[in-house]
Amino acid sequence: MLKIDNLHAEVGGTEILKGLSLEIAAGEIHAIMGPNGAGKSTLAYVLGGRDGYEVTGGSATYDGIDLLELAPHERAAAGLFLGFQYPVEIPGVSNVQFLRSALNAQRKVRGEEPLSGAEFLKLAREQASALKMDAEMLKRAVNVGFSGGEKKRNEMVQMGIIDPKLAILDETDSGLDIDALRTVGEGINTIMRQPDKAVLLITHYQRLLDVVKPDFVHVLAGGRIVKTGGANLALQLESEGYEAIAEAA
Ligand code: ADP
Ligand code: MG
Ligand code: MG
């Protein structure tokens, strides 16, 4: 589904990704762990097509197409979803307005009919309920005044509504208390643990991986994947730290 080969990327003139390679097949959940400043968020932004993140070498193909040639909205319409480490606040735009226009814009690119207000509201309420988010929050301005945990939960509601093929989730667990972590983790499993979907989960902690069990764990250090293993690698990282493992690699 996603094949990243020898990817190099710069931010503000500094090379951050230095030959990163990674392959993700449908049905798989991959976790990326690594020290602060390793380039994890940069990888997510490059794959999402964020301005200011310049690819200087290598390739990324998604379902056989050149992902890097697509505009961000085309990537989204093709089924790519990005969950941000720091979700943005959008004053004056309600969650419902935002999500309905995002979903319908994607449906349009795919040649599908837009959902009516009533159809959309039904879908949004179902997803909010599945993630134990108060449906009243759907009416509030996107993320404005939401706590860190509420933003992350809201992001998973967005993901449930958008129903992507490939989700790249950047520190979705940060700011979550234990109960929210479980709800969000189970949400990821329900929405994304399917044979035709895949997830790239960026996290610092094992605790999310207790709920969303990864098929592969990668260590990103210094702009590349320096080690790949199974779910046990996350446990090893937690006990030994990144440094020892990055150095041994
Ligand atoms: P991680 O998510 O792994 O903690 P990031 O991808 O956020 O790391 O950052 C990787 C490196 O890129 C860091 O050293 C960071 O300071 C640097 N960086 C991020 N954004 C910019 C920018 N706009 N200009 C220059 N350097 C940046
Ligand atoms: Mg970080
Ligand atoms: Mg980061």
Image (tube, rainbow, N blue to C red):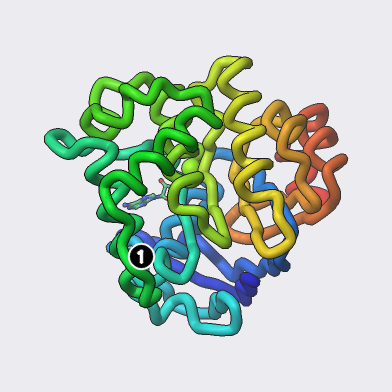
Residue shown at the point (31%, 31%) measured from the top left: 138
The x, y position of residue 109, in whole percent, is: 34, 74
The front one of 61 and 59 is 61
Which residue type does callout 1 highlight? Gln
- Is residue 233 found left or right of 33 in the rendered image? right
Task: Out of 119 and 23, give the one closest to the viewer.
Answer: 119
Does label 1 point to a residue whose CB lies under 8 Å from ligand 3? no
Left/right placement of residue 6 relative to residue 162 reads right
Q: Nearer the viewer, residue 188 or 50?
A: 188
Q: How crowded is mark 1: few (under 14 residues within 10 Å), some or many (20 or more)?
A: many
Q: Is mark 1 on a helix, strand or loop?
A: helix
Q: Nearer the viewer, residue 247 or 10?
A: 10
Quarter of the image that includes the C terminus: bottom right
Name the residue: 38% across, 71% down. 112
**Is residue 13 in sight in this rendering?**
no
Residue shown at the point (31%, 71%) measured from the top left:
108
x, y (%) of residue 113? 33, 68
- Residue 193, percent from left and from top: 70, 49
Seen in the image, is 158 located left or right of residue 226? left
Q: Name the residue under label 1.
A: 106
In the image, residue 172 sits, relative to residue 49, either above or below, namely above
Tell me what residue is drawn at x 65 percent, y 42 percent.
190
* Residue 80 percent coordinates (x, y): 48, 62
Q: In the drawing, does residue 178 fall left or right of residue 145?
A: right
Q: Is residue 67 above or below residue 210?
A: below
Residue 27 visible in rendering: yes
